[in-house]
Image (cartoon, rainbow, N blue to C red):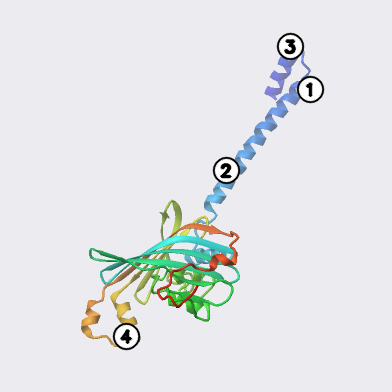
Amino acid sequence: MTVKTQMNGLGARKGQGVGNAQVALGSGFRLRIGRGLALMAAFSMVLAAASAHAGLTPGQVIQLSMAKYASARSYSDMGQTISIMDGVTTTTSFKTLLARPGLYLFSWRNTRRFFDTTVGSPSKAVFCSGGGNFLEQGYGPENEGSPAVALELAAPSSSGAATAIPGVFLKLNNGNVLAGDDYNTVLLPDEEVAGVKCYVLTSHSRGRTRTLWIGMNDFLIHQLRTQVSIQSMQADLQVVASPDPETAALLQPCLYIETISNIVLNADIPPRKFQPSIAHYASNYAQ
């Protein structure tokens, strides 16, 4: 009421009508209120976005990651796996191409370092370009019958990378790093991988500890690490052979670290891109 009286008086002294002064005041007041509400709404949206994924359980993070891969019609990446086993460091560089309904090409190349000696190996690939499921190791493509079998056969030579992401995208059981029970998975403090802020999930089973770095915004896997204890290796060795005590005593813990980059989703990838180009060891094989 005081404001209206002052404005009315001022408007009268300047020859302005009372109604005009009230309209001007009302417009300015509504403008300030409107701006304030807009700022509050924008701030609320920022807070909502910042806290949208706060308080997620490990199981929820895994489910959101699985849903993200399931919703993609294609996927590609580049990456590197470093494995340390029995004093030998193996670096595996790889490329991944995946597309619905079942096309894939995973190609890789190993470099092994023994003390001061470095030895590289030719490129290898496992792929399906619309026909069979082939493993190509330089001797010509061999049809392994199914993606599960083909990728699993490629896993040892690729330090497990052949089944990690392809297993998730193709929803396979063996090697799928998001498959299985998550009851013993725990969340560690957030970390960044190549500038990407990630959830860090770790789980332990039968002497193996696996840690995943899953992007907080894209819910894609950007890094994974697997540590294998001596006891776990001894148990695996007992399944396939009866090692002598000296061999068992020489076993050392293994470490695998896979880092993934250049991830692209939903690009158009023609089927011909899923054919590898590899030089064959034997001349009697033709691509």
Mark 4 vs 1, N-terminal side: 1
- Could you tell whether 67 is left or right of 235 in the image? right
- Nearer to us: label 4 or label 3: 4
Give the number of the disc on residue 19: 1
Neighbour class for label 4 at 10 Å: few (<14), some, many (≥20)?
A: few
Mark 2 vs 3, N-terminal side: 3
Helix or strand or loop: what does disc 3 sit on? helix
Neighbour class for label 2 at 10 Å: few (<14), some, many (≥20)?
A: few
Q: What residue type is labelled 2?
A: Phe
Q: Name the residue under label 4.
A: 238
Q: What residue type is labelled 1?
A: Gly
Question: Which percent across, then down, holds residue 255?
Answer: 33, 68
Mark 2 vs 1, N-terminal side: 1
Residue drawn at point x = 56 percent, y = 59 percent: 265
- Could you tell whether 71 is left or right of 285 in the image? right
Give the number of the disc on residue 43: 2
Q: Which of 194 and 97 is in front in this view?
A: 97
255, above or below 9, in the image: below
- Could you tell whether 181 is left or right of 17 in the image? left
Mark 2 vs 4, N-terminal side: 2
Q: In which quarter of the image is residue 10?
A: top right
Q: Mark 3 points at which residue?
A: 13
Q: Which amino acid does label 3 sit on?
A: Arg
